[in-house]
């Protein structure tokens, strides 16, 4: 039976897929950890709403910028070695923060910069997994590996509770323990695919930016993933500020939202495999924009806000899977650097959203303007995708070129 005709689980390397997911999952947990702790950290350090927003946004931006560097490292050293290096750096940063403590806003920002390496795991886990699978199974493979977004659920559920019991400084030390387990699992199970493209020069990496499709993918992902991670970092503070919820309850609310987005990433990839990534993504943008616009009305009930945020995060999570069903079809040979570039754009989108919501709150006393602006960008992405869909389906997405539905 050829790879073309094999089922999903027979066509790739399941231990590597699991290792990629587990590494990505726990990396995202610590990348996001300042979000659920933001209310407690801000209270102890005396931070303003804008400073709190910037603290939460810093690891997002750092991770975005490091994804490009990690994408290059992946193509030169292979995903497995790159992932091991990244995990070691993150554990060292958390251990240092726990041992010496965080005593100022500037130190919190420094930790955020270091935690960006955990966000760069994106540029490792996805190429590690996708290179094992044929085109018709890319959506599912990338979706499962990318479901490591669910690590944000672990942080939202447990970080505020542990901070209340042991102090938020000690949460950084606790986080090193599961990361150590992930390191061992990754070391034992992950295996680089036999068909890894040869390393390119830096100029060759940058040459993909001459292709306008690369910019479209970067923009589309800045909305879906940027929306997911930006909201995930902001929601603990949002529920605390808007409805007076204590950090623990706000963490539970946030966990429900990010769980929804994480759950639907692999489902979004599977849906895109079945109906085509373009059709799936257009639907997700419509739904997400509508839900976020409704929340921007400043609903009187926290439960109503939670319901619309969950629905919006479902759409954004599915949109993440849809983008990465399309990307390997267009840039299979350049998937390492394109994963870094697209992931970088997603992280920058998340940084701008988290920082922008904090700025809106500081300037106007409300998150309304920031939420409505983000919903508007979702509509812009819808129109952008509509403008390129015919060209994509008749060139690299044509049935004669790829077995996947575009």
Image: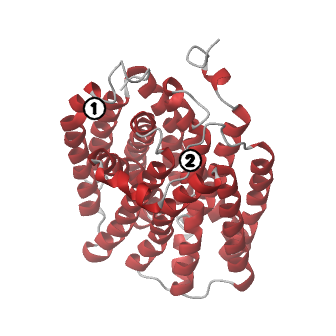
Q: Do the residues bearing badges 1 and 2 touch, measured as CB atoms within 8 Å?
A: no
- Which quadrant holds the C terminus? top left
- The residue under the point 47% across, 52% down is 337
Q: Is residue 154 above or below residue 147?
A: below
Left or right: 36 in relation to 203: right
Question: Is residue 20 visible in this depiction of the protein?
Answer: yes
Res 273 quadrant in image: top left
Q: Nearer the viewer, residue 7 or 42?
A: 7
Horizontal and vertical percent for residue 260? 50, 41
Q: Is residue 232 above or below residue 379?
A: below
Furthest residue in direction top, as rendered:
1
Q: Secondary structure at mark 1?
A: helix
In the image, which disc is placed on residue 179?
none
Find disc 2 in the rendering and name its residue: 198
Dot 2 crowding, Cα within 10 Å, few <14, some 14–19, many 20+: few
- The residue under the point 55% across, 88% down is 104
Horizontal and vertical percent for residue 55? 48, 75
Find disc 1 in the rendering and name its residue: 392
Disc 1 versus disc 2: distance between alpha carbons? Answer: 27 Å
Q: Is residue 268 above or below residue 317?
A: above
């Amino acid at each position: 039976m050829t790879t073309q005709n094999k089922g999903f689980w027979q066509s790739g390397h399941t231990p590597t897929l699991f290792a990629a997911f587990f590494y990505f999952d726990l990396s995202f947990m610590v990348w996001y950890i300042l979000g659920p702790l933001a209310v407690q950290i801000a209270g102890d350090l005396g931070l303003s709403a804008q400073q709190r927003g910037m603290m939460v946004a810093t690891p997002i931006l750092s991770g975005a910028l490091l994804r490009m560097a990690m994408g290059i490292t992946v193509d030169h050293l292979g995903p497995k070695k790159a992932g091991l290096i990244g995990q070691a750096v993150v554990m060292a940063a958390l251990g240092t923060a726990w041992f010496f403590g965080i005593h100022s806003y500037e130190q919190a920002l420094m930790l955020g910069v270091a935690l960006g390496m955990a966000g760069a795991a994106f540029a490792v886990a996805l190429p590690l997994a996708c290179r094992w699978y044929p085109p018709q199974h890319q959506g599912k493979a990338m979706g499962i590996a990318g479901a490591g977004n669910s690590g944000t659920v672990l942080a939202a559920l447990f970080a505020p509770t542990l901070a209340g019991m042991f102090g938020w400084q000690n949460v950084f030390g606790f986080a090193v323990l599961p990361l150590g387990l992930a390191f061992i699992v990754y070391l034992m199970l992950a295996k680089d695919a036999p068909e890894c493209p040869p390393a390119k020069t830096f100029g060759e990496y940058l040459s993909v930016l001459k292709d306008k499709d690369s910019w479209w993918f970067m923009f589309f992902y800045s909305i879906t993933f940027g929306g997911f991670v930006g909201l995930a970092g902001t929601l603990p503070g949002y529920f605390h500020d808007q409805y007076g919820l204590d950090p623990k309850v706000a963490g539970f609310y946030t966990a429900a939202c990010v769980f929804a987005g994480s759950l639907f990433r692999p489902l979004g990839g599977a849906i895109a495999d079945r109906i085509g990534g373009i059709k799936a993504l257009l639907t997700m943008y419509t739904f997400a924009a509508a839900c976020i616009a409704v929340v921007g009305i400043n609903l009187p009930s926290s439960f109503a806000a939670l319901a619309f945020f969950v629905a919006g995060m479902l759409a954004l999570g599915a949109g993440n899977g849809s983008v990465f069903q399309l990307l390997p079809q267009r840039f299979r040979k350049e998937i390492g650097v394109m994963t870094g570039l697209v992931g970088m754009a997603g992280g920058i989108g998340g940084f701008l959203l988290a920082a922008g919501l904090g700025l809106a709150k500081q300037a106007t006393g409300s998150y309304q303007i920031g939420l409505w602006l983000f919903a508007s960008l979702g509509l812009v992405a819808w129109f952008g995708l509509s403008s390129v869909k015919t060209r994509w389906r008749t060139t690299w997405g044509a049935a004669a070129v790829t077995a996947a539905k575009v």
